Amino acid sequence: MQGMAVDRNNNMIYAAKINTSNHLTQLYAIKMNGSSSNRTVKLLKNSDTNSTSNDLGHANDLAVKAQKGDDQVSLYVAPMSDGVKYVKKIVKLSVNTKKNTYKVAKSYVLPYQGANLSISGITYSVGADKFIVRSGNRFFIGNFNDQKGQFEYEATFTLNDSKAIVNQSVVDVSKYILQGISFYQGTLYVPLSKPDSNGGASNVSVILTYPLNINQMLKEQKETPAKDFSKELFTRKDLSFRITSSAFTLFEIEAVDFDDGTLYFNTNRGKNATQEDMIATFNDYNYYK
């Protein structure tokens, strides 16, 4: 699996997965209707190409912007540098929730110091009405300019990854594999995968949490201009997640997101050359409890 995002207003999960036969992206919509027996999974079709597999790069992360009851939902995709058509762009899809189809509405670039950046993470804050996008360990807060086809940032920051707190212990995660990001209730959630001896993902994943006040950061950097990325965030000491799978040799959390306080994650799971990917929750954790 690749990116995942939760439409909190319409109880829908969107997830991306690369079709290994053609290396194109497939998008799934999972309706959350309480009990597992009532949940539905739909494979979305591109209404322009009439295909369920399309070039969206690596689709490393997704973000949703929607209102309750919307028939058309905006789904943003971070392709990274993969694929052909949307290399180093952010793709905005218009998803028809009634027909289970989508089409490309717009694509954007994030120009910085003369070059368009490869975007690997994206998340949307409903309260601030701002997006956070990531390129490597550089984070930008801002919004999209449809006329220019650009992401225009208003603030920047980095994350400290050499002194991360994981289960009350200091861990250097600077060599861990970057995944997606999610902002929820004043905290930025960042899943990472521990590399194996060959540099690939292993059966260990962590989720770090960083306190982030978006409006305060925007205000500070507007009133007191400083060099880009001079703001560094440090992990919370009281909240982190670590999973070591004894059942699977691969357990790679790709993305996390929330619905009503429940933390969802999607993961690549595998053993003995088989894949058993899944979307799951942390049963013992809820933001509001």
Image (spheres, helix red, strand yellow):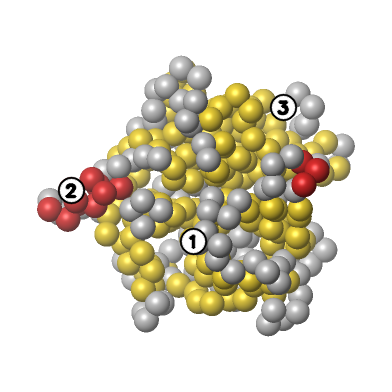
Residue 41 x/y as whole percent: 76, 55
In the rendered structure, which disc, 1 or 2, sits on the residue that comes first in sequence? 1
Q: Which residue is mark 1?
A: 67
Q: Is residue 77 above or below residue 237?
A: below
What is the crowding at mark 1: few (fewer than 14 residues within 10 Å), some, or many (at least 20)? Answer: some
Q: State the residue in front, 263 or 81.
A: 263
Q: Which mark is residue 220?
A: 2
Q: Amino acid at mark 3?
A: Ser
**The residue tagged with tag 1: helix, strand or loop?**
loop
**The residue tagged with tag 2: helix, strand or loop?**
helix
Q: State the residue in front, 161 or 32.
A: 32
Q: Amino acid at mark 2?
A: Glu
Q: Examine the rendering and report whether any part of residue 124 can be seen.
A: yes
Residue 135, picture quadrant: bottom left
Q: Mark 1 or mark 2: which is in front?
A: 1
Residue 111, picture quadrant: bottom left
Q: CA distance from mark 3 to mark 2?
A: 42 Å
Q: State the residue in front, 187 or 232.
A: 187
Q: Which residue is mark 3?
A: 245
